[in-house]
Image (cartoon, rainbow, N blue to C red):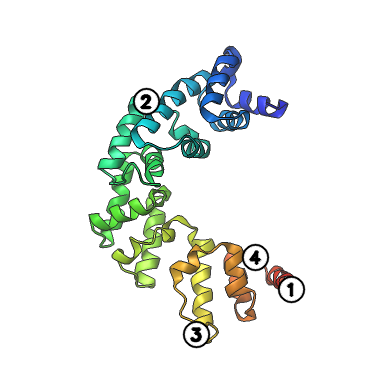
């Protein structure tokens, strides 16, 4: 660990100064695979060092036995959201069962550990409240479960944000629940930075007859920023100003990027 890593870890967890580092760090390294991963966990975790090690080690074993997930995949999830997995093993075991039975996400699904994170992050009541928001817009329980199975991270948004998004997608754009339930990307990206500006750009291009085909909006939403700019913004000066205003950029910066793409 570098000096800055040590300082940052101590600032987050002052009680670490009273602990023996060696055994816990060695145990974490056996689970996480490298010194770099151990440092990442210590920086992100709100638990003390010994607590982190004592929870994480049996939890990784539980995940491997219950889900049959490889160590590499478990490591990636732990490094991304460590506090979701540094919990009491009984709580994690109960969560695994509920994610499979109540959220309907199979344990062998690539979305299963995301479901675990959402259950621990949001809590059962919060998840049910958000389900009610969808159902208030005419969604069936089956529609909501289909969306969750597609990507549980849809439920990281607040209830107010979900209402705003559903109002836009359903009331303004006219999409139906069964269509949206199969397109989780509408609920995991930024509404202001992605949904609104990209739809506006496509509408302008379509109205002016500048699109060679009727491009599907959900496909455009899935594109990276650089690809969307290259295909739908930079070649058409007609949308530069609108896109710049909606995304908080400038027409000048778009022109610079267009020149670079043409060189």
Report the residue marked by disc 2.
89
The quadrant in which residue 168 appears is bottom left
Disc ID at residue 259: 1
- Residues under numbered marks 3 and 1 in contact, where contact means CB atoms less than 8 Å apart: no
Per the model, the C-alpha gap separating discs 1 and 4 is: 16 Å
Report the residue marked by disc 3.
207
Report the residue marked by disc 4.
249
Q: Is residue 114 above or below residue 189?
A: above
Q: Residue at x 28, y 36 (%)?
A: 97
For marks 2 and 1, the one nearer the N-term is 2
Give the side of residue 97 with respect to residue 120, left or right: left
The quadrant in which residue 87 appears is top left
Q: Is residue 31 above or below residue 194?
A: above
Q: Residue at x 51, y 27 (%)?
A: 31
Q: Residue at x 65, y 28 (%)?
A: 8
x, y percentage for residue 208? 53, 86
Instruction: Name the element at disc 4.
Output: loop
x, y percentage for residue 262? 72, 74
The quadrant in which residue 182 appears is bottom left
Instruction: Name the element at disc 2.
Output: helix
The quarter of the rendered structure image containing the N terminus is: top right
Query: Is disc 3 surrounded by few (<14), some (14 to 19) or many (20+) residues within 10 Å?
Result: few
Disc ID at residue 85: none
The quarter of the rendered structure image containing the C terminus is: bottom right
């Amino acid at each position: 660990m570098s000096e800055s890593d040590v300082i940052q870890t101590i600032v987050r967890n002052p009680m670490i100064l009273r602990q023996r580092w060696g055994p816990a760090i060695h145990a974490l390294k056996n689970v996480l695979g490298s010194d770099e991963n151990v440092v990442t966990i210590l920086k992100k975790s709100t638990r003390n060092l010994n607590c982190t090690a004592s929870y994480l080690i049996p939890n990784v074993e539980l995940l491997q036995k219950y889900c049959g997930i490889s160590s590499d995949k478990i490591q990636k999830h732990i490094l991304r959201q460590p506090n979701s997995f540094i919990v009491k093993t009984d709580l994690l075991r109960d969560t695994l069962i509920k994610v499979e039975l109540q959220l309907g996400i199979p344990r062998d699904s690539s979305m299963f550990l995301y479901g675990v994170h959402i259950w621990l992050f949001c809590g059962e009541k919060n998840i049910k409240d958000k389900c009610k928001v969808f159902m208030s817009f005419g969604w069936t329980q089956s529609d909501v479960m289909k969306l969750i199975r597609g990507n549980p991270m849809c439920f990281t948004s607040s209830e107010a944000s979900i209402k705003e998004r559903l109002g836009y997608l359903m009331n303004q754009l006219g999409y139906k629940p069964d269509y949206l339930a199969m397109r989780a990307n509408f609920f995991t990206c930024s509404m202001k930075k992605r949904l609104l500006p990209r739809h506006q750009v496509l509408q302008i291009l379509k109205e002016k007859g500048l699109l060679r085909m009727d491009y599907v909006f959900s496909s455009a939403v899935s594109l990276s920023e650089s690809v969307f700019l290259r295909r739908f913004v930079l070649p058409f000066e007609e949308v530069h100003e609108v896109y710049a205003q909606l995304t908080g950029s400038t027409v000048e910066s778009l022109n610079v990027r267009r020149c670079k793409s043409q060189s």
